[in-house]
Image (cartoon, helix red, strand yellow):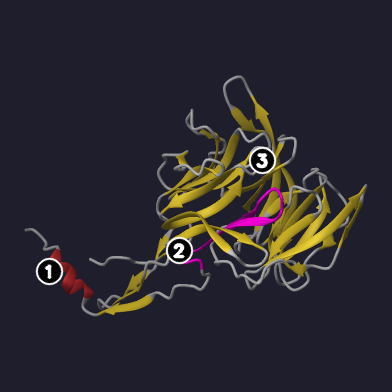
Amino acid sequence: MLDDIRLAGLAPIALFDFSRNGSFVSLIGKGERSAIFWLDSAGHTLPLQAAPVYYASPRFSPDGRRLAFAMGTPRQLDIWIKDLDANTTPLRLTRMSGSNHHPVWTPDGTSLVFESVLGESQSLYWISADGASDAQRLTDDKIRRVPFSFSPDGKRLAFSQEGGGGGGQSEIWTAPVESGSDRVRLGKPELFLRNIFGGSSSFSPDGSWMAYSTDETGRLEVYVSPFPGPGRKWPISSGGGSRPVWSSNGRELFFLTPEDRIMVVSYTAKGNAFAADKPRLWSEKRLLRLPTIGHDVAPDGKRFAAILNADGTAEPIAPQLIVLLNFFDELRRRVPVSH
């Protein structure tokens, strides 16, 4: 009946509606097409994964030699891995229905955890990075969980989970990762932070701190707290901030501004004390605003993998608003009722 209806989110939702009298309204456009680029602090970009499709959640392996990402369409995403040294065709890791995204590497680089969404079914899975075996389901209770970070020893996974307060709020939890003779499972989760909005979290390189974003002041800001706590929290951003990520060198913390630019903070940590310098702009380049995390810092802290429009820009591609009258009449014409 109509091609190229825009989709929103990773569930996803088709953006159309119609009235009882047959008026139909829809957003049309190919705004999902993007690519992954190398981005440096000067704002220079180089294609990293250039095929123009829909991408989500790029994540570097701990050694920086591979990049995991979700690729496909908002309706059907799978996890792929690109060897950055060989620059060969990416390896398709999953072949599962639905949106499979938010890959998180284990610290030894041998496996990943990811989220899979198919209708109302939302689960976490574990899969080997070589693609030699099928994914193992870790959760099966239809509660939305988004994995974000492993502790450096690989023994705990940090993830956000739908909060009990409603209103789109979430909570940050961590759970022990337990390996058996034939499978991996998550142990009993422990709450780290309750009823926030945003929910992204990241273990520090030494595992002693957790960076996270919360809107308790009325807008999203980035904080650092000791892990596992309790303890005081240190504010990192002051003009809005989200999606914190540490460099592996143990000296810098990055986050995203409300204007979709990357900020960086130098810090020192000793014992129970954390000291952060004033945030500074890492790059003038704006990133593409996405419903999921669209960037990750390379282990050396010098470059990012960033999802941008296929032409390297970050400007939103404006969709067209289409209004059709007498939609039901057209539907009856194309799909006649048999008697």
User: Would residue 11 be seen by someone viewing this image from the given angle?
Assistant: no
Asked where in the image residue 233 lies, by quadrant, the reply is bottom right
Disc assigned to residue 183: none
Disc assigned to residue 310: 2
Which class describes the residues within 10 Å of circle 3: few (<14), some (14-19), or many (20+)?
Answer: few
Q: Name the residue under label 3.
A: 63
Closest to the observer: 52 or 5?
52
Q: Is mark 1 on a helix, strand or loop?
A: helix
Stretch of the chain drawn in magenta: 294-312
User: Which label sits in the foreground, 2 or 1?
Assistant: 2
Q: Is mark 3 on a helix, strand or loop?
A: loop
Q: What element carries label 2?
A: loop
Q: Of label 3 and label 2, which has the lower sequence position?
A: 3
Amino acid identity at mark 1: Arg
Closest to the observer: 245 or 208?
245
Q: Of label 1 and label 3, which has the lower sequence position?
A: 3
User: Which label sits in the foreground, 1 or 3?
Assistant: 3
* Residue 196 covered by magenta stretch: no
Q: Of label 2 and label 1, which has the lower sequence position?
A: 2
Asked where in the image residue 44 lies, by quadrant, the reply is bottom right
Asked where in the image residue 278 lies, by quadrant, the reply is bottom right
Q: How far apart are marks 2 and 1 (CA)?
A: 38 Å
Could you tell me residue 183's position as x and y percent? 58, 25
Q: Mark 1 points at which residue?
A: 333
Amino acid identity at mark 2: Ala
Which class describes the residues within 10 Å of circle 1: few (<14), some (14-19), or many (20+)?
Answer: few
Q: Distance between the residues labelled 1 and 3?
A: 59 Å
